């Protein structure tokens, strides 16, 4: 799985910004640029608004998602999009989705909490600081959002799943819900497990998903171990986490696209 992930990362860097076809994004998907001083760059942000957003004055919960290039638009994805907008439109979902474009060759650095002895990385604290202290205040000021942790989710796959879970541990008062798809815990396994052991309580609602054919046994094993640690921090009767292991599921957009609807419905 580790080799497949590295190859996947390289494809992100090479093909992530190349148009594959005409845009497939829904009309209510908007984009803007915002300075990210924590990362010494600017970020392109994609925003999905519910179809009825302009028809009333109500406020909406918000999902922050990584790898925005692959969420809404086939023309910016390199191996197929998640169809987040079409999926939410089909169920008349009352939620705002904020997609953050990955940083190309900086993606691994941004999404990994601790430096790996072979692969480097380890700058997720800066990336999360950008989301929490720059992006979220901007979104809350410019869109009608419900700002509490119970109405704010962090959602991603692979390294995006890793940084989402880490974000919940680091900012429990900001992110009350997490979509953790095929999380690359292997990258910082020791550090994440140690962090879990030192965490006294965990109130975040977490949806775990992976396939049993993602490359080797690490994915399922790590997910089971993390789930055990999560359950040790709270009573399982509260039903604050759910784990789905898809038979035959592989480490790709197809798995994550097909799992997104159920994850959203369970989390919200």
Image (cartoon, rainbow, N blue to C red):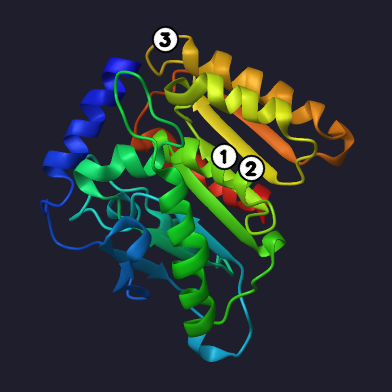
Relative side of 264 to 186, left or right: right
- Rounded to the nearest angstrom, the CA distance separating label 1 from label 2 is 7 Å
How many discs mark residues in the rendered view? 3
Residue occupied by mark 2:
169
Residue occupied by mark 1:
165
Confirm or deny contact between disc 2 and disc 3 (CB under 8 A): no
**Mark earlier in primary sequence (2, 3):** 2
Q: Is 207 situated above or below 21?
A: above
Residue at left offset 64%, top offset 59%: 174
SS under mark 1: helix
Image x and y of residue 39, in percent: 32, 56
SS under mark 3: loop
Q: Is 253 situated above or below 71?
A: above
Residue 160 lies in quadrant = top left
Residue occupied by mark 3:
216
**Mark earlier in primary sequence (3, 1):** 1
Residue nearer the viewer, 125 or 18? 125
Relative side of 46 to 79, left or right: right
Image x and y of residue 215, in percent: 37, 14
Residue 100 lies in quadrant = bottom left
Q: Is 5 situated above or below 34?
A: above
Residue at left offset 39%, top offset 60%: 99
Residue at left offset 44%, top offset 68%: 135
Pick out the residue farthest to the top.
217
Q: Look at the image and tell me whether residue 258 can be seen.
A: no
Residue density around tag 1, few if under 14, some if 14–19, many if 20 or more, within 10 Å: many
SS under mark 2: helix
């Amino acid at each position: 799985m580790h080799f497949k992930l590295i190859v996947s990362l390289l494809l992100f860097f090479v093909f992530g910004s190349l148009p594959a076809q005409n845009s497939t994004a829904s009309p209510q998907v908007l984009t803007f640029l915002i300075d990210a001083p924590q990362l010494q760059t600017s970020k392109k942000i994609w925003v999905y608004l519910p179809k009825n957003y302009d028809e009333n004055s109500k406020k909406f919960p918000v999902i922050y998602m990584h790898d925005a290039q692959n969420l809404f638009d086939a023309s910016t994805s390199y191996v197929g999009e998640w169809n987040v907008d079409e999926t939410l439109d089909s169920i008349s979902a009352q939620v705002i989705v904020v997609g953050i474009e990955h940083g190309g060759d900086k993606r691994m650095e941004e999404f990994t909490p601790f430096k790996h002895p072979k692969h480097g990385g380890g700058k997720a604290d800066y990336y999360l600081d950008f989301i929490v202290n720059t992006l979220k205040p901007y979104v809350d000021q410019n869109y009608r959002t419900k700002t509490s942790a119970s109405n704010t989710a962090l959602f991603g796959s692979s390294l995006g799943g890793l940084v989402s879970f880490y974000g919940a541990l680091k900012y429990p008062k900001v992110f009350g819900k997490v979509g953790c798809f095929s999380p690359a815990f292997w990258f910082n396994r020791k550090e994440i497990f140690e962090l879990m052991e030192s965490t006294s309580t965990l109130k975040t609602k977490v949806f775990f998903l992976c396939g049993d054919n993602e490359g080797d046994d690490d994915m399922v094993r790590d997910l089971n171990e993390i789930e055990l640690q999560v359950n040790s921090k709270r009573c399982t009767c509260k039903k604050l986490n759910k784990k789905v292991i898809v038979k035959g599921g592989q480490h790709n957009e197809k798995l994550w696209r097909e799992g997104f609807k159920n994850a959203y419905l369970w989390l919200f």
